[in-house]
Amino acid sequence: MVNLILMVVAAVSLVVWLVQEVKGRRQMQQALQWCAEKRTASDAQSLRQQVLPNWLEWTYRLVVFAWFVWIASVVLLKDGDFALALVVLTIVAGIIAGLDRFVFEKARQAFVASGNVAAYITYFVKQDQDALKSEFGGMLPIAENARSFFPVLLVVLVLRSFVIEPFQIPSASMVPSLEVGDYILVNKYNYGLRLPVIGTKILEVGEPKRGDVMVFFPPNDPRYFIKRVVGLPGDEIRYVNKQLYINGDVIQQTLMAEVPPLKPVTQVLSEQLGNVDHLVNHDKRIYRGDFVTTVKPGHYFMMGDNRDNSSDSRVWGQVPEENIVGQAFAIWMHWHSFSDLPSFNRVGRIR
């Protein structure tokens, strides 16, 4: 729903700007030409009143209102694909900025500098001559905003799509490694460069390694998930009595603590998974059963570090390679809720 609203608002913005630039600008130029021939206006203010069509302002307000509706829908429905929104915004801003810069700008400036109009503004308008030339030879508000924001949007899109993307941890499935409210950075380069939104890999760089913390889309789910890579393609994964085995080898675990101290319900263990030494939680009150599986080619078996409180490959299956987003490598802020202040005491690399 939110993505549909985004597409409609973006299309409306583009159409409104084109109508303003083609039809509205023509009306302005015809009115200004008439004033130049009749010598009717004596100052810049009266000239503006005569040549600026009222509907230009109202259609601009319509565009602003439409974008507020989209923002409100994102907040209220708690939905929407930020990657898609960024791509759409960048494309729309780029189209408007490009057409305005290379098509409409020269025509506007040429009109303002032409014969009767230039002479009229210079000799018959008593006030704000430079501002008036800039106004009638300059950009409409939509184009002005597009040309201002397009470079910023493009840089953000490139960085977010191909270098680093920020994420927030929404659940406790990765406790104790990651807590609810952690803001993390995800490397978008390590596992190959992918096109935004559609996810098609365009450059091979590397593959996930056992023990990596990875962001991905689970099968048949449009939401981002973050878990640890446990099984690589071809691995046999066995989980018996909360003990993990990979290709028949036991994954070593060392008990670090039991909490709370008086009536412990959670075991905190150190686990060596590949080259990564990290912590996992076992809930003594929960037993989810044993399983054995073999990881399919081009797929990965994911598990949360909060082993007994994690929706992972044990629930929704193995993750295909095309669903990979990137490798989580650092925590840069912790902000549990809007009622709390952000903190930076958890800043550091993710193990």
Image (tube, rainbow, N blue to C red):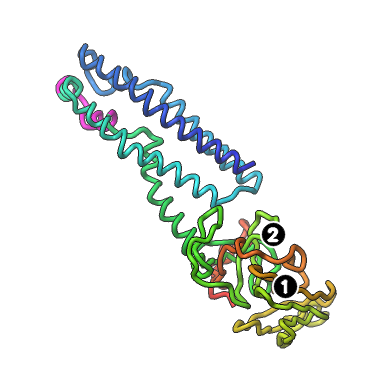
Q: Which of marks 2 and 1 is nearer the N terminus?
A: 2
Which class describes the residues within 10 Å of circle 2: few (<14), some (14-19), or many (20+)? Answer: some
Total labels drawn: 2
Numbered range of the magenta stretch: 123-136
Judged by depth in the image, the label closer to the viewer, 2 or 1, is: 2
Instruction: Give the SS element for disc 1.
Output: loop
Taking the spot 46% from the left edge, 27% from the top edge, the residue there is 59
Inspect the image, locate mark 1, and give the three-letter code of the amino acid beneath it. Asn
Relative horizontal placement of residue 277, taking residue 188 as reference (left or right)? right
Relative horizontal placement of residue 136, taking residue 150 as reference (left or right)? left
Query: Residue 285: percent from the left, percent from the top?
Result: 85, 74
Q: Residue 219 carries which label?
A: 2
Residue 130 part of the magenta segment: yes
Query: Is residue 9 something one can see in this rendering?
Result: yes
Query: Residue 318: percent from the left, percent from the top?
Result: 70, 66
Query: Residue 280: percent from the left, percent from the top?
Result: 70, 78
Q: What residue does disc 1 label?
A: 306
Taking the spot 46% from the left edge, 31% from the top edge, the residue there is 15
Residue 329 part of the magenta segment: no
From mark 2 to mark 1, how far is it between C-alphas?
Answer: 21 Å
Taking the spot 49% from the left edge, 58% from the top edge, the residue there is 161
**In which quadrant of the rendered view does residue 50 lie?**
top left
Q: Do the residues labelled 2 and 1 touch (CB within 8 Å)?
A: no
Front residue of 330/111: it is 111
Front residue of 83/316: it is 316
